[in-house]
Image (cartoon, rainbow, N blue to C red):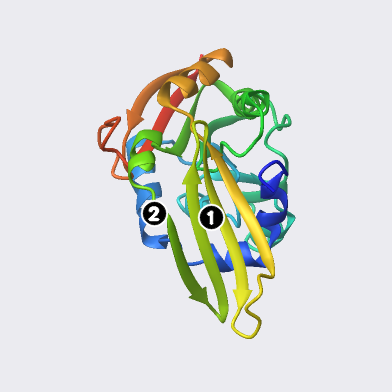
Amino acid sequence: MADKAWYKDWFNSPYYHLLYQHRDEDEANQFIQTLISYLKPPKGSLMLDVACGKGRHSIAMADMGFEVTGIDLSAASIAAAKLQETDQLHFYQHDMRLPFWVNYYQYAFNFFTSFGYFKTRREHDNTIRTIAQSLQKNGLFVIDYLNVHFAEQHEEKTFTTSIDDVNFHITKWQDEDHFFKQIQITDSENKTPRHLYTERVAKFSLGDFNDMLAYQGMQIEEVFGNYQLGNYDIKNSPRLIILARKK
């Protein structure tokens, strides 16, 4: 299962949206507010939200007065996002490994560890290339990733949660190169597993991102360690939030 392109089926699954529907909206919205206050983009700035999901962050940024495009591989997510489209907000189903609009955007974002899913380094390089090419010269890219060193020490191994009569049994583990999360799904009437999904996220460090970004003509300007944009500490920061500029 781990060798399959797991994200294609899982991100289109209704179970994915059920499991993650209660992600902390307040924290997410506060992060967007904090980030925009820090970046101070001019009104009407052109923004790209890469791996936008159902578009909650794109919507928030459009509501602040920016022109926002969201792209995501999941047809189900984009179908839901398109219901919120306006003159300033557009969504497209798109594989982020493939080129998108070139030299168009002033800002690009990749939020909440929506990276690191692919099997090969080349595929991840292709994604960074897509983002770099989408930006105008001096454009800014913000990627919000997990901090590998923190996650390695704070991984919750196994737990079960129930949502709307669906039981999710979640097991986490890691190897040298990846974090894994297996989601086994049963319902209250039938205890045999109906579905099994395994998420896999690469262990990319700040050095890895520096290499990938530099290769595409991007230079890191700032690194933050949490959603309040505090300083990054390699051991103690829960997040790795990178601000890079296209040279």
Q: Is residue 238 above or below residue 184?
A: above
Residue at screen point 51% across, 38% down? 109
Q: Let me know if residue 52 appears in the view.
A: no
Q: Nearer the viewer, residue 49 or 84?
A: 49
Sort mark 1 into few (<14), some (14-19) or many (20+) by Cα contacts within 10 Å.
many
**Which residue corresponds to mark 2?**
156
Which amino acid type corresponds to the residue marked 1 in the rendered image?
Ile
In the image, residue 125 lies at what x, y percent? 62, 23
**Residue 118: quadrant of the picture:** top right
Q: Which mark is residue 80?
A: none
Q: Nearer the viewer, residue 120 or 172?
A: 172
**Which residue corresponds to mark 1?**
59
Which amino acid type corresponds to the residue marked 2 in the rendered image?
Glu
Q: Let me know if residue 89 appears in the view.
A: yes
Sort mark 2 into few (<14), some (14-19) or many (20+) by Cα contacts within 10 Å.
few
78 vs 116, left or right, is right
